[in-house]
Amino acid sequence: MTADPALRLEPLDPGHPDAQALMAQSEALMSALYPAESNHFEPADGLREPGGSFFGIWRGEQLLACGGVKHVAVGDEPAYGEIKRLFVLDSERGQGLARQLMARLEVELLARGVPLARLETGIHQPEALALYRRLGYIEREPFGGYALDPLSVFFEKRLALIAH
């Protein structure tokens, strides 16, 4: 895939109306695929600095995709980033936008010195499952506040800290 020079990947306030519209589309899709107890929608505030980071991919004035990471540090457990709210418009899927967002979120974690990314997704999203596996994410047990759920798949990836 060649990079489209018309696309911009940049930080985005998750409260921005266009981000809220994409998240509403994502919630509608997830609510159609899974019961309420299997959906874990992160509020916009959880993805704002300093506890989170959020990015969007734009073509002109149209937001095509978004995704964020929630920065988590719990007791003695190693700090990690939880990938949340990754969503690409139907019309833009298959063009590598999710892959670009995932790469940017991983860079964000590494810049904060966090070498571990985790996420939860559902069993009825084969494209997402395939993407995460291609990107080197491996299945794991539930983490954080998640309970075992037959409709959920939990992943993590150890990110390589690069010495300069």
Image (cartoon, rainbow, N blue to C red):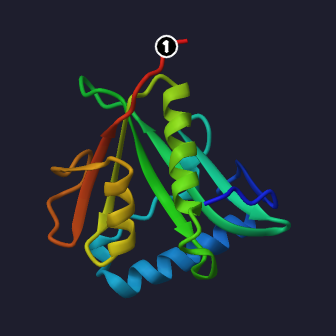
What residue is shown with label 1? 163
Q: Residue at x 55, y 48 (%)?
A: 47
Q: Is residue 69 above or below residue 61?
A: above
Q: Residue at x 21, y 72 (%)?
A: 151
What amino acid is at disc 1? Ala
Q: On the picture, is 86 further left or further right than 150?
A: right
In the image, residue 71 lies at what x, y percent? 46, 37
Q: Is residue 139 left or right of residue 78?
A: left
Quadrant, the C terminus: top right
In the displayed structure, 20 sits above or below 52; it is below
Q: Position of residue 38 (x, y in %)?
A: 28, 71
Q: Can residue 26 be seen here?
A: yes
Residue lying at 39% horizontally and 32% vertically, measured from the top left = 159
Q: Quadrant of residue 156?
A: top left
- x, y percentage for residue 132? 36, 56
Q: Nearer the viewer, residue 95 or 8?
A: 95
